[in-house]
Image: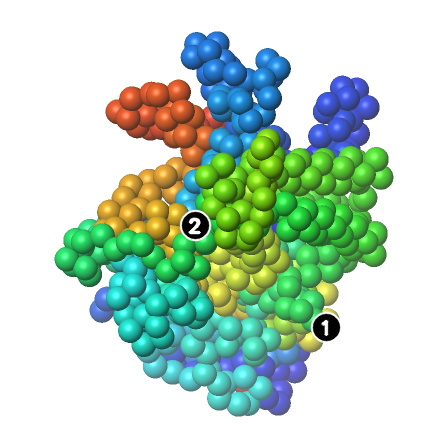
Amino acid sequence: MNTTTPQNTGPKTKQQGAVKRFLHATELDTRLLGMLGALLLIWFTFEIYCAMFLGRPSVFLGAAAEDATGFLTPRNLWNLSVQTSSIGIMATGMVLVIVTRNIDLSVGSLIGVTGMVMGILQVDILPQYLGLGHWSIWIITVAVGIGLGALIGALHGYLIAYLTIPSFIVTLGGLMVWRGAAFLANGGKTISPVDQTFALLGGGPYGAVGSSMSWVVGILGCMGAVWMMAHSRAQRRKHEFHLRPMWAEVSMAAIACGAIIGSVFLANAYPWPKGIVNAYAKANDLVVPPEGLFISHGFAIPVLILIGVGICMTILMTRTRFGRYVFAIGGNPEAAALAGINTRWMTLKIFALMGMLSGLAAVIASARLNSATNALGTLDELYVIAAAVIGGTSLAGGLGTIYGAILGALVMQSLQSGMVLVGVDAAVQRIVVGLVLVLAVYLDILYRRTTK
Amino acid sequence: MSNQGTPLVEMRDISISFGGIKAVDHVTVDLYPGEVVGLLGHNGAGKSTLIKCLSGAYQADAGEIWINGKKVEITNPRDARAQNIETIYQTLALADNLDAASNLFLGRELVSPLGFVDESKMEAETRKIMHRLNPNFKKFSVPVSALSGGQRQSVAIARAVYFNAKILIMDEPTAALGPHETQMVAELIEELKKQGLGIFLIEHDIHNVMKLCDRAAVMKNGQLVGTVKVDEVTDEDILSMIILGKKPGAADSEAAV
């Protein structure tokens, strides 16, 4: 099922230019290309601004990667990837919620309350029974956080599906209730630091998998991408459907693998800071040579979690009955019910899933801060909804993709962290983010009108 | 048409009301294999409501449904499907954002041994059945919102036919169609009849009723006016049943049914 790709009709192709022919043959989603274009535009605008107006060294003007302080540096892009993780994870769940014509305004507060409960659990409760720093603390904590999120989400889903209270109201109530609960949980006090293993889930030098492991991930990723394309081609051949030309398949595979390998290089180009290297060398009895040791970060753990969630959610949405039903309910709830789909039970499950993902996002957010505060995740619901909508999820329901939402989160985060980098005032940041959201939806409307 | 032995469907004494208004009031109809029974009446006469009790969209307040001589409980669309009852709704009940294959298999997706939706197989099956029903149908990879009325109708019909329905309910299947497509539906109904399906046909066009149906059941204000054999009455007889709510003298043969 391909709900967003416009149909390509055959005979016209001959008069089209090379670019169009490439797009046609590869059956690439043009809106995906549009978003990638927007992302690159944002990145280069910040880079150029940094270089021209702030006089910062840029790799594009011959500066070495470790001296560059503009936007397009391994360090900034690595940080960007970590900052995107928590919003990106929740945005994948928000796609399901919005596709079924609902909304969830409570995810930010869910982060607050699940983060707080996890903080209390791993700092105040579990060490009493297991001892401080016990290996299982982080596992129990994460399981409880995700489970609590699922439970709260299921409660919202029950109120929406079975008591037919509009989702806007239920989750608006949830927004206030759970933020209040987060405060009450520990009397408004911040909990810090968290369990050491738990903290790795938030990234940071030790919370990244290092150079060789990143290569393993990258190569597995390439193999997976190629296998998927080959498998899909084999399926189409088996049923004698139209096949993409071989050159298109090969170039798609090359682009996918190139992007994956490129991101490995990028993650490995960001070294540990000197202080961390020295501490690490001391702890491991290593001698640091005078020019310093180059220890790569590699992919950050939260980024790998985001990628894992993205893959699972994509499979869920495109390859399972559950995903079919989500789209069917969004397209025509009545038809879905007449087709024998239990739409209420589906709604409950969707909100429970959204809650689970909020719990997981809370793990990353609190681990990254190395603390649990009752304000954790404030306003996140707006960024999550914005990410899903910028990523092409239609508020009218029935349309949306997981990769779009993750890209949307990356766009939002790029804007935000870029503005911080160039020193835009916080008030102006909000104005820009707000305007971009409205503009993105308008462009989306134009896009849909022209591709219809 | 012999109409002997066990009826395929018997709806006995069905009643359903909404907010105090009796939409269907003690109605009894039956249907035999290889037979087309037309359901007629003004808008709001209760035809669609009656039929939704059979398709599982509504649950009757009172009355019984018998299939092949056995009493059955139909509380939701899944129960109806399990009894091989398929429905083509007036609104077609398609998810506009999904393609033909996804709609055809909605709620009954083909899955691989691992439990994943087998998209290619569903598309291949869809191509097969559409080739039989509507050879001109080519738009397999676009959402059904991009299809014409007739093409959408073909998808809805294909969904009912593909799953080996024994009992088919068609709610005004030709209302939105041009003459050519209407003819196609008529031919399909004839073919399905030959295969031994029983069909309930809700239809406003008296001409179509005379052509396609074996019997006609007329409803007015939620009540059954009467059931007549179509070849024993005239157009005017049926029209007067619909308008006046009275059975014509010519339809006395009903007693023999």
The residue at the point 49 percent across, 31 percent down is: A76
For the N terminus of chain B, which image quadrant?
Answer: bottom right
Where is mark 2, residue-wise? A202
Mark carried by residue B119: none
**Label 2 is placed on what type of residue?**
Gly
Q: Nearer the viewer, residue B222 or A160?
A: A160
Measure the C-alpha gap from mark 1 to mark 2.
Answer: 65 Å
- Residue A450 picture quarter: top right
Q: Amino acid at mark 1?
A: Gln
Question: Does residue A10 sit above or below B167 in this rendering?
Answer: above
Q: Is residue A106 left or right of residue A257?
A: left
Q: Position of residue A437 (x, y in %)?
A: 38, 30
Q: How is the image coloured?
A: rainbow
User: Mark 1 or mark 2: which is in front?
Assistant: 2
> Can you say whether A238 is above or below A155 in the image?
above
The residue positioned 46% from the left and 39% from the top of the image is A275
Say if A163 sits above or below A266 in the image: below
Q: From the viewer's perspective, is residue A444 above or below residue B7? A: above
Instruction: Kindly state the secondary structure of the residue where label 1 is placed.
Output: loop
Let me know if residue A239 appears in the view. Answer: yes
Label 2 chain ID: A
| Mark 1 Cα-neighbour bin, 10 Å: few <14, some 14–19, many ≥20 | few
Q: Residue at x 33, y 43 (%)?
A: A380
Residue B139 screen position, x and y as percent: 69, 44
Q: Chain of mark 1?
A: B
x%, y% of residue A409? 45, 39
In the displayed structure image, the side of residue A180 where residue A357 appears, left or right: right
Question: Which residue carries the number 1 mark?
Answer: B195
Q: Neighbour class for label 2 at 10 Å: few (<14), some, many (≥20)?
A: many
